[in-house]
Each structure stands twice: as structure tokens, then as C-alpha cells.
Image: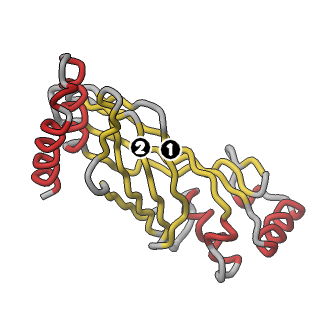
Amino acid sequence: MIKGYFNSFFKYCIWLCLPFLVGSCFVKQFFHMKNVAECTFEVQELIPVSIGGINLKDRDLSDFTFMESARIAGLFASGNLPASFVLNLHVDNPNEKLAAMNKLDFIVYINDRELISGSNDSRVSIPGKGSAVVPVYLQTNLALVLKGEKLSALLDLALSAAGESNNPVVLKIKLKPYINVGKRIIEYPGYITISKNI
């Protein structure tokens, strides 16, 4: 259904931009976007980078000192707990030709609660019959995301991201690719939605 919808949109875009399709590069860009619509997107991993200014690289929650734990609890209670993550997306291109996009909007949800939204402005290219890992960098205030929840909800999220929780959470991502065609920016109709239990 998505492919059929996109094919109709694709034909509309060709007519809309026909005066600008004066070179083969424009035609190639249209087909790059069409190929993106046929790619398979999957969540590869969600990597915690830092929380409350504490570097989480190569660390488990059990490694936290008493002072670090107290700092996180205090920031959470104050309503200002900055956190950063890297979300790695695995993209498979089943087409013979290149799939490419110039921008990727995203909305990330944890258990149907919006965690963060933003854009990745780096060009992404997936070779024909190939795959690529697309990193998406996330920064958010976890205290706002988990407003009204207890500190245990924060711990569940952190443990799930680290792959240590017995109560996995549902991670859902909505993606909207864009591609530049001349001076126009063409967006994917609707969103590509993927989810994973972490």
C-alpha cells in the first residue's frame, strides 16, 4: 500500500518538477528517492552516550558511584536531566540502483511516549543490493519525557537501552526522508514507521 501511494506521489512530483528535469542528474535523484521507499529500515541498536553529564561509554549502571547515582536522582527530581543516545538504523536496499536521501526527519517514541524529534541533515547513500548503518544522534531531557513517572521508570529505560532489563520497552521510530531536486526539496509522503522491543 505504501509503495502504491508513493508511486502515485512519484508521478505527481515528475509532472510538478518537469520544467526542472533538464539533466539526467535530476532524474537520478528522483529514482534515488523512489528506491528509498523500497528499502527496509530496522533498529540495530540504541546506545546510551551520557546522562546528567555522566559519560556512559563502556559502563553499566552497576558501575555508578554513590555520588553519580545521587546526581542523577537529583537532576531527575529537579526536572532537568539531559541525556544523549545514538540510534543506529540498519537499511537494506533491495534495488539494483543506489538509494539516497539528503535529509531524514525522525520522531522517537518509548512505550508510545514521544522521546525526541529532530532531523539528520547528512546525505545518506545505500548502494544497490547493499546495506548501510545510519546513525541518528539524540539529545533530550529525560525528566520531561518521563514527567509524572517515578525514578524506576528512568532506570527501566536505561537498563533496556543497555540490554539489561527484564522488562523491555517498545522503541518506535517514525522516519521521513527528503531529497533535493534542483532547488526543490521533495519529502517522502507520510512516515516510515519501525519498532523494536529493547
Which amino acid lies under the numbered mark 2 shown in the image of this protein?
Leu
Instruction: Say whether residue 127 is left or right of residue 75.
Output: left
In front of the other: 61 or 55: 55
Where does residue 42 sit, x and y in percent of width and height?
34, 49
**Residue 121 position (above or below residue 50):** above
Count of labels shown?
2
Where does residue 195 sit, x and y in percent of width and height?
36, 61
Label at residue 192: none
The first of marks 1 and 2 along the sequence is: 2
**Residue 74 position (above or below residue 50):** below
Instruction: Say whether residue 36 is left or right of residue 154.
Output: left
**Residue positioned 54% across, 59% down in the render:** 116
Q: Which of the 4 image quarters holds residue 90?
A: top left
Where does residue 31 sit, x and y in percent of width and height?
18, 31
**Residue 31 position (above or below residue 2):** above
**Residue 75 position (above or below residue 21):** below
Which amino acid lies under the numbered mark 1 shown in the image of this protein?
Val
Tell me the residue that label 2 is attached to: 104
**Residue positioned 15% across, 27% down in the render:** 96
Contact flag, marks 1 and 2 (Cβ < 8 Å): yes
Label at residue 136: 1
Spatial CA distance of label 1 from label 2 is: 9 Å
